[in-house]
Image (cartoon, rainbow, N blue to C red):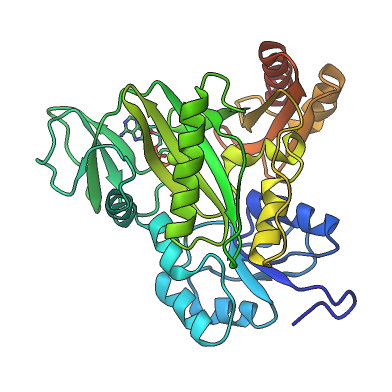
Amino acid sequence: MPDPVTGLPVVGMIGGGQLSRMTHQAAIALGLSLRVLADAPTDGAALVTPDVEVGAADDPAAVAAFAKSCDVVTFDHEHVPQDVIRELVSAGATVYPGADALRYAQDKRAMRQKLSELGIAVPRWSNDPDGLPRPYVAKAVRGGYDGRGVWFIGPGDELPDTDLIFEERVAIVHELAIQVARTPSGKVRCWPVVETVQKAGICVEVVAPAPRLSTSLAAQAEEIATTIATELGVVGVLAVELFEAPNGLLVNELAMRPHNSGHWSIEGSTTSQFEQHVRAVLDWPLGDTRPRARSTVMVNLLGGPHTDLANSLPAAMAESPTASIHLYGKGARPGRKLGHVTTLGDDLVETRDRARRAVAVLRGED
Ligand SMILES: Nc1ncnc2c1ncn2[C@@H]1O[C@H](COP(=O)(O)OP(=O)(O)OP(=O)(O)O)[C@@H](O)[C@H]1O
Ligand SMILES: [Mg+2]
């Protein structure tokens, strides 16, 4: 049901976190307003959109009631159960990405199997805890994020008591990610490959484009992302996390939504991942994805022991006037992703320094 004032379609997003908040921000620029199903009224997106409903993403009644007034329903996380999505679709809702595609972002076993079938290289893996030599990496099939659900298992270690797959510990040269958007009519557009830096399983920094990547591997990553988006029938933004290993690229993980590795695109690309996601799920033409600068650096702001944003936000603005600061409307707790900072420039080292300095000040370290 289009918006009664503008006549423009209504996009509903299930999940009210920062991805939803930033998608709302992009939707506003297009004359839209995101409709949000949030877990709580204090969720980042619920704080900033008037059109919010509070309900659980796995509650079929809440999801169905929410979807009724949306022209298209999409997600800011992977946690809507398959049967809930399928019920929505049989009741007449348009849902992107669809359940068949989303399955591969919800279930790491299904994802590893499918990519292997498509001939896309993934780390050597097994369903059998004795199928690989230790040390190896055990991964929860469902529900992991920010390194929760990933265990490095040595010879004497006990296995966690959950559904697991097992994979070789890859000798990672660099971690990379590539994002691609696909429309229901099959148009596809990639952003440049980025390098991601993780600490303790959490992404802390992203550099776009990946500064140490050969043009042939960059082209290969684009081909991998395009193949996955097309073969899995993804609609919206797809993020493909990759390992650059000594023998080439391996796909680590898929996310079918805007993703932390794409936040750089808000300032760093002509079309941000959030705007592109909205365009894609509405089957509108996709925007240009070229970078605006030689280097764009995004540094995540994780809460520290002394983070006090009321004081540190103006201090960071004073320290780094060229840093684009994004805060997600969260209370500061150690380790929590509270926001990010993006800088653009010609010189990677100087550009990265500016972003890191701003984040250090925001954390209350300087
Ligand atoms: N097979 C592997 N070999 C070596 N390191 C790995 C392997 N798998 C994962 N890692 C490391 O652990 C990190 C987190 O793994 P992964 O992305 O699979 O988990 P996640 O918790 O689902 O993450 P996300 O927050 O991206 O959803 C990776 O970015 C990488 O640094
Ligand atoms: Mg990951």
Using the image, determine if residue 89 lies above or below residue 258.
Answer: below
Give the vertical position of 87 relative to 177 (above or below): below
Q: How many marks?
A: 0
Which quadrant contains ligand 1? top left
- Residue 254 at x, y = what percent? 44, 48
Q: Quadrant of residue 2?
A: bottom right
x then y, percent, for residue 112? 30, 49
Image quarter (top left, top right, bottom left or bottom right) of the C terminus = top right
Residue 258 position in % (x across, y down): 60, 50
- Residue at 73 percent across and 53 percent down: it is 275
- Residue 178 is left or right of residue 10, and the answer is left
Q: Residue at x 64, y 51 (%)?
A: 19
Residue drawn 65% across the image and 38% down it: 338
Question: Considering depth in this image, is 203 or 72 the residue closer to the camera?
Answer: 72
The answer to whether 133 appears left or right of 41 in the picture is: left
> Which one is in front, 247 or 134?
247
Q: Is residue 251 visible to us here?
A: yes
Quadrant assignment, res 200:
top left
Q: Residue furthest left?
A: 130
Task: Name the quarter where the N terminus is drawn.
Answer: bottom right
Residue sitting farthest toward the bottom? 91
Query: Is there any visible trace of residue 197 in the rendered image?
Result: no
**Residue 29, how many percent across, how many down?**
84, 55
